[in-house]
Image (cartoon, rainbow, N blue to C red):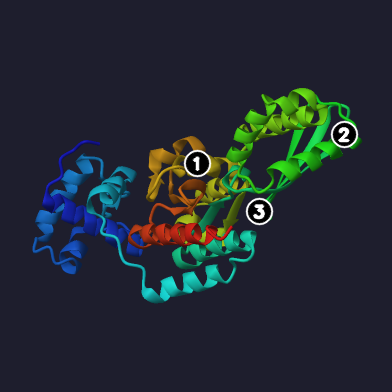
């Protein structure tokens, strides 16, 4: 909404959001007057609260109750009022130590990033695993399944394994072994983009025109890369689902069903976290931002992580909208930066 909000309105809205995040209860004017040193009377605060309700930033769940921020009110708070907190040095040290201790194993590193997010946010954590395009390739192998399908096994330099099926190719296994050998000898150690560029050159070169093995190997290799670009949703790690059940909001059975269903259908979460890949900075999705995936009563705080200047994947947390954003946003940002730094070793 485009309502103008003066400094008094910002102060009162900010105090209400902070109090609601802290207690989970509707907030009344007397509490704000007593706890937040705004030098305003309860009557004045009540009048401003009524104005904020008219603007759509607050609502009153019961006639005799205080107010609760709406998703629109939370968005205004996030965009114009929120002051982020510094991560305590002891927490940074713990995150650095735990993640650095897993740097020798790529998947353990991703699991540790997920664990750190859950431990320090008390929300469920999400890590979208990188696509193979983010790293260089260690090995490629073709396996004939039948006369119409070939299984392609790609191993990245991180040790991650990706499986693809190429359809419409009837090639004997003895020939596929020759293609394996040629591609591994020629292209391994390159990134997917580097491999693609080299394949394009090879396919138009003299060798490909006169050497059948090279011609078929480069043609099949390019077909694999084309299909990788259209790959379905990437793999995803989710940790700390049980931590959400400790939140009072989860006493609502319908909300509980919604979040459980979301965790079962990982594609819903991927659609949101894909929105941050390629960008910089932390983004918060709540309310109508999440309507299309059916979790508008929740919030997702997410950002991307990188390998060099290239986006590798994304990570974040999901939980009730009543989340301590002043702590969670810096946490998500810091874990992503540590992960990006450690990925330089792969």
In the rendered image, the vertical position of residue 204 relative to residue 313, given as above or below: above
Q: Nearer the viewer, mark 3 or mark 1?
A: 3
Per the image, the residue denoted by label 3 is 157
Q: Residue at x 54, y 69 (%)?
A: 100
Per the image, the residue denoted by label 1 is 274
Dot 2 alpha-carbon crowd within 10 angstroms: few under 14, some 14 to 19, many 20 or more: some
Q: Secondary structure at mark 1?
A: helix
Q: CA distance from mark 3 to mark 1?
A: 23 Å
In the rendered image, the vertical position of residue 196 relative to residue 114, given as above or below: above
Quick check: 202 left or right of 36?
right
Dot 3 alpha-carbon crowd within 10 angstroms: few under 14, some 14 to 19, many 20 or more: some
Q: Secondary structure at mark 3?
A: loop
Q: Nearer the viewer, mark 1 or mark 2?
A: 2
Q: Quadrant of the N terminus?
A: top left
In the rendered image, the vertical position of residue 67 relative to residue 194, given as above or below: below
Between disc 3 and disc 2, whose residue precedes? 3
Q: Residue at x 60, y 44 (%)?
A: 191
Residue with the most extreme bottom position: 90
Q: Residue at x 84, y 38 (%)?
A: 178
Quadrant in the picture for residue 55: top left
Q: Residue at x 76, y 35 (%)?
A: 165
Between disc 1 and disc 2, whose residue precedes? 2
Quadrant in the picture for residue 154: top right
Q: Quadrant of the C terminus?
A: bottom right
Per the image, the residue denoted by label 2 is 175
Q: CA distance from mark 1 to mark 2?
A: 38 Å
Q: CA distance from mark 3 to mark 2?
A: 25 Å
In the rendered image, the vertical position of residue 77 relative to residue 166, given as above or below: below
Q: Residue 245 at what x, y percent from top left?
A: 53, 60
């Amino acid at each position: 909404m485009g309502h103008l909000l003066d400094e008094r309105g910002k102060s009162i809205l900010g105090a209400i959001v902070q109090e609601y995040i802290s207690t989970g209860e509707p907030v009344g004017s007397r509490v704000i007057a007593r706890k937040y040193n705004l030098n305003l009377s309860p009557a004045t605060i009540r009048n401003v609260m009524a104005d904020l309700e008219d603007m759509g930033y607050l609502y009153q769940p019961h006639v005799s109750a205080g107010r609760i921020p709406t998703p629109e009110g939370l968005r205004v708070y996030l965009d114009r009022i929120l002051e982020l907190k510094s991560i305590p040095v002891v927490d940074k040290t713990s995150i650095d130590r735990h993640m650095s201790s897993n740097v020798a194993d790529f998947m353990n590193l991703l699991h540790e990033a997920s664990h750190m997010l859950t431990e320090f946010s008390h929300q469920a954590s999400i890590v979208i695993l990188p696509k193979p395009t983010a790293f260089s390739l260690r090995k490629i192998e073709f396996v004939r399944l039948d006369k119409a399908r070939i299984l392609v096994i790609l191993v990245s330099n991180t040790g991650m394994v990706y499986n693809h099926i190429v359809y419409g190719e009837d090639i004997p296994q003895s020939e596929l072994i020759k293609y394996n050998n040629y591609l591994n000898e020629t292209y391994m150690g390159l990134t997917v983009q580097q491999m693609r560029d080299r394949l394009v050159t090879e396919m138009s070169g003299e060798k490909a025109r006169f050497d059948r093995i090279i011609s078929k190997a480069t043609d099949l290799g390019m077909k694999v890369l084309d299909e990788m670009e259209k790959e379905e949703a990437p793999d995803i790690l989710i940790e700390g689902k049980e931590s959400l059940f400790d939140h009072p909001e989860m006493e609502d059975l319908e909300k509980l069903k919604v979040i459980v269903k979301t965790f079962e259908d990982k594609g819903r979460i991927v659609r949101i976290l894909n929105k941050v890949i390629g960008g910089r900075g932390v983004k918060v999705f709540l309310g109508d931002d999440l309507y299309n995936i059916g979790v508008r009563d929740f919030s997702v705080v997410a950002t991307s992580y990188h390998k060099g200047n290239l986006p590798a994947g994304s990570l974040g947390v999901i939980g009730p909208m009543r989340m301590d954003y002043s702590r969670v946003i810096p946490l998500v940002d810091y874990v992503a930066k540590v992960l990006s730094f450690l990925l330089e070793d792969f």
